[in-house]
Amino acid sequence: MNRQSFHYVVALVGNPNCGKTTLFNALTGSTATVGNWPGVTVERKSGTVCYHNDTLEIVDLPGIYSLVPYSPEEAIAGNFLNNKPDLIINIVDASNLERNLYLTTQLMELHIPMVMALNMMDVVKRRGDFIDCAILSKLLNVETIPVAASKGEGLSELLRAAASAVKKTAVYPTVKKPVGSRDPETALADARYRYIGELTQKAVKKHSASKKSVSEKIDAVATNRYLAIPVFLLLILAIFYITFGPVGSFLVRCVDAFLTGWLSPLTDSALTAIGASVGVRSLILDGILAGVGAVLKFLPQILLLFLLLSLLEDSGYMARAAFIMDAPMRKIGLSGRAFVPLLMGFGCTVPAVMGTRILENEKDRRLTILILPFMSCSAKMPVYSLFISSFFADCRPIAMLLIYFSGMVMGLLSALLFKNSILKGEPAPFVMELPDYRFPTAQTVWLQVERRIRDFLQKAGTTIFVATVVIWLLQRFTVGLRMTSDSSCSILAEVGRRIAPLFALCGFGDWKSAVSLLAGLISKESVISTMSVLYSGKLEIALQSNFTPLSACSFLIFVLFYTPCVTALAAVRRESGSLRWMALSAAYQFAAAWYLSAMFYQCALLIQHLQNCI
């Protein structure tokens, strides 16, 4: 006779960067983003795992140091725990046991059944230290399981302990609040740490070694007062050289050869063989394949960039980068902690805006949100790559680095403007854990890259595909809804001519450029897919016929700075909690893009004119 099955809600709780999301992925088979730096998880995620007949709903909560919330993502964790889940799996970084156990003492006071997962035990063993889990279990009355989530070790034992603990009544020792103290909270914290000290003294044996650890040796250079920023810049330059230099360019050419040299002729032959009409062939070849293919060929460079960034993240260096940037960022009104969402902005503005939840005060969050779009997202990369390969092929890595650097400079200048006007105030104190360096794991890096592939292909198959079809249709019909082979008489041309004068001072006042920028509000990749539909022939040659190197630079400046996509604006609206802030962000971005693009183009024309006169 089968026993009754039950459904239990299990909360994963622990300090930032203790390995919660890695454990969550290992238990549930999910592919949530992980990284070797604090602040990766800013909202709760859930997945399920079956153990015998029972279902455990595992909920991955943002990292917290205490049950007293100081930021929105900490409030998410606190609110969830107040609703009393069936079980808490307390993930503890075994390599930083004393600090992590402070949260454990608070969790025991909730009187919710709990199991403690001592994660990163492989690091403890590598150091030569020893933690007696049996003694910890006895003293805390919490079953303690040693695990190494990144290697999948100890997971079955953890599930067994969780399934057993969830059916028991929680009875845990608690730290008594001191009586008669002038400052009860401080006294209670001191009492907790004394209690933790007694625990670790009995359960932990540390290997006495006078030599510096590997992390300390690396940090002697990576966080050195004089060498830190040069090392950071050299690493970024190396990433750009690999991505946009010979390696990345070769991969782009290979994909382009596959699309134009094999897939397009094969599709044409197949359509001809089945007797497809001229209109259908044009839609598929000149519309879909040309538009979507123009974006897809830059997929290798996008993947290379995120592969290299993932290696830096998983190694633990990015936390150092935030530490390095704290001093210069304080001058613009932000702490080094804001560097985390700003760095995420180079991937996608949407999760980066959500990542501002790790910032403790509203002023810092809003200031970061306003300058985030200047951190050029990966969706703009195909535009940069296309124009650079068309006009500045001899200096691809340097040109790309200048573009990204210009975005960062504009973000910093904008932060100064807002800091001294609408968002006055001091930045919050900067506290961030510096994790040990480690070799990036293939699984973690693959999860990052695989997610980028999936997101990119999903966007190519939905948003860009639909935008391409709509653009093709709009250039085939006149305002009177009659078919035309002359795109200059189409609905699209009419729309483009009405907005094109706005860009005349910027040097690209033709209707095709205007329509491409308009499509970019849907997704920035749509700028390229739209151009591929509107310009006949090979796109690079078409651009060289319609742009000069000067107007191409001006166009790149505009794309770099102008209003982010509608999805990003929706994220700004949601996270700022105000339609007014979203409107301010959109208007400021557009005004900055237009002004800087026009100023660059007109000043460059003036310099050319003066040189000709001389």
Image: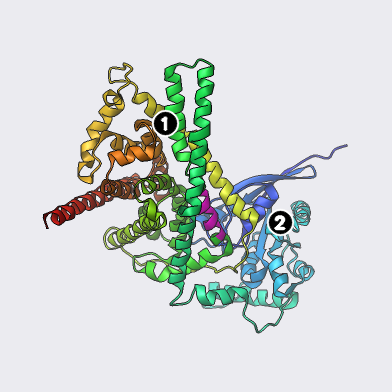
153 to the left or right of 370: right
What amino acid is labelled 1 in the image? Thr
Model colouring: rainbow
444 to the left or right of 326: right
**Chain part drawn in magenta:** 301-311
403 to the left or right of 32: left
Place of residue 3 in the rendered image (x, y in percent of width and height, measured from the top left): 83, 40
How far apart are the alpha carbons under marks 1 and 2? 54 Å
Question: Does the image show residue 183?
Answer: no
Q: Main secondary structure of the magenta part?
A: helix
Circle 1 sits in a helix, a strand or a loop, which is it? helix
User: Badge 1 is on which residue?
Assistant: 468
What amino acid is labelled 2 in the image? Pro
User: Badge 2 is on which residue?
Assistant: 113
Residue visible at 35% across and 51% down in the picture: 392
Q: Is residue 432 magenta?
A: no
Crowd around label 2: few <14 · some 14–19 · many ≥20 (10 Å): many
Pick whichever, 40 or 10, lies toward us: 40
Pick whichever, 357 or 392, lies toward us: 392
Residue visible at 12% across and 58% down in the picture: 614
Question: Does the image show residue 239?
Answer: yes
Residue visible at 41% across and 40% down in the picture: 523
Which residue is most to the right? 1
Instruction: Reply above or below: 50 against 397.
Output: above
Place of residue 515 in the rendered image (x, y in percent of width and height, measured from the top left): 31, 34
Circle 2 sits in a helix, a strand or a loop, which is it? loop
Residue visible at 63% across and 77% down in the picture: 213
Instruction: Reply above or below: 243 against 328.
Output: above
Place of residue 13 in the rendered image (x, y in percent of width and height, measured from the top left): 62, 58
Pick whichever, 585 or 311, lies toward us: 311
